């Protein structure tokens, strides 16, 4: 047994610890090692364990890193299962068609019981950050908007990939005391800003390709910085609600929840309360989440799509 910083490891525990440390470049290794060992000590003390084995090392690491590291742990724990569930979907059409596709509707506290008057024909504007029309993100947004309309809402969908939307240029003129425009960059965002202002509810849907939100959404939310005015005052008043939809390939519905949380936090900074969120997964493999007609495979899972409809219906009900 080897001892590292006063922690004793079993041979398999030491091996997996060293393998985990190898994930990161040297500049990060000490920081990550300190975090993992701190968590490992806490787990060992609470369970009165004197030696750390592979299972305990992985558990400690999972408390430190986001869920997006799960593929690495899944390979270590059961490579055969990983091959069958993940790798085979890239070369075997039967495995591709058998992969799990799931939509998870986030739990939220029940709405307080109070009398309130909902706006007549409220406006809901949806922003699709996916470049793939009729893909899984797009279809989930459409189903959510269908639920909104059943509840009497007026709806509109905007494809961020199609509009003329430049980058934030960092001029910070939106922060000046006498700034009048939301943003000085002249493009389609001028009209979009007004649509956000006029809406009672917002839907944002996006795919995750590289461990974070798609570039279209990143650029879009950068441009929202214009809503924050001089001395951190907001151009948006409280009262709007939102739904956030995130989609990805890895077939576990919590792999990138931390990315969805980040988007929810950004909306909250702009006085918009997210009351519905969906995590949708399983969109990878040889056809990259599409069927033989190049449409999102989510269309073949009506029960999962229904969750988007229900969330859209509930979104309108949540408008103050």
Image (spheres, grey):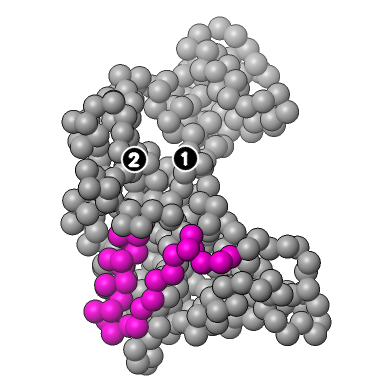
- Location of residue 223 by image quarter: bottom right
Viewer-nearest of discs 2 and 1 = 2
Query: Label 2 to label 1, Cα distance in Å?
Result: 21 Å
- Give the structural element (helix, strand or loop) at label 1: helix
Choose between 95 and 242: the one closer to the eye.
95
Chain-order first, disc 2 or disc 1: 1
Q: Quadrant of the C terminus?
A: bottom left
Is 20 rendered above or below residue 155?
Answer: above
Task: State the image coordinates of residue 6 (x, y, percent, origin top left).
Answer: 66, 18
Residue 290 image-quadrant placement: top left
The reply to whether the magenta stretch includes residue 202 is: no
> Residue at image x 51%, y 51%?
214
Residue located beneath label 1 in the image: 67
Q: Could you say where residue 74 lies in the image, as x and y percent from the top left?
A: 39, 27
Q: Do tag 2 and tag 1 residues touch (Cβ < 8 Å)?
A: no
Helix, strand or loop at mark 2:
loop
Please give the name of the residue rendered at 60% of the width and 9% of the height, measured from the top-left corner.
Answer: 2
Residue drawn where x is 69% and y is 30% of the image: 28
Q: Position of residue 241 (x, y in %)?
A: 45, 75
Disc marking residue 288: 2
Q: Residue 233 appears at what percent x and percent y?
A: 70, 78
> Magenta stretch: residue 152 in it?
yes
Magenta residue span: 138-165
Image-quadrant location for residue 78: top left
Quadrant of the snapshot with the N terminus: top right
Could you tell whether 61 is left or right of 234 in the image?
Answer: left
Along the horizontal axis of the image, is 167 left or right of 49?
A: right
Q: Quick one: 58 or 255, which is closer to the camera?
A: 255
């Amino acid at each position: 047994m080897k001892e590292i910083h006063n922690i004793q490891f079993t041979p398999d525990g030491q091996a997996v610890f060293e393998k985990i440390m190898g994930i990161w470049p040297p500049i990060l290794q000490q920081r990550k090692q300190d975090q993992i060992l701190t968590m490992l000590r806490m787990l060992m003390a609470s369970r009165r364990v004197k030696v750390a084995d592979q299972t305990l090392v992985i558990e400690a690491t999972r408390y430190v890193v986001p869920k997006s590291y799960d593929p690495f742990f899944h390979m270590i724990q059961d490579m055969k299962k990983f091959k069958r569930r993940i790798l085979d979907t890239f070369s075997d059409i039967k495995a591709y068609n058998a992969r799990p596709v799931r939509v998870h509707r986030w739990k939220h506290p029940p709405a307080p019981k109070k009398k309130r008057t909902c706006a007549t024909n409220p406006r809901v504007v949806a922003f699709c950050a996916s470049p793939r029309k009729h893909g899984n993100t797009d279809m989930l947004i459409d189903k959510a908007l269908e639920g909104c309309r059943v509840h009497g809402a007026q709806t509109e969908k905007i494809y961020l990939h199609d509009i003329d939307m430049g980058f934030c240029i960092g001029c910070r003129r939106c922060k000046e005391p006498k700034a009048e425009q939301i943003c000085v960059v002249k493009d389609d965002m001028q009209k979009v800003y007004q649509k956000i202002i006029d809406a009672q509810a917002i839907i944002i849907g996006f795919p995750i390709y590289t461990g974070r939100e798609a570039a279209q959404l990143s650029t879009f939310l950068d441009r929202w910085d214009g809503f924050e005015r001089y001395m951190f005052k907001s151009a948006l008043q409280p009262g709007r609600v939102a739904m956030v939809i995130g989609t990805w390939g890895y077939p576990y519905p919590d792999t990138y929840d931390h990315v969805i949380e980040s988007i929810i936090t950004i909306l909250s900074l702009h006085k918009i309360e997210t009351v519905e969120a969906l995590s949708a997964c399983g969109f990878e493999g040889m056809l990259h989440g599409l069927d033989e007609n190049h449409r999102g495979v989510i269309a073949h899972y009506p029960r999962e799509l229904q969750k988007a409809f229900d969330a859209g219906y509930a979104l309108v009900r949540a408008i103050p």
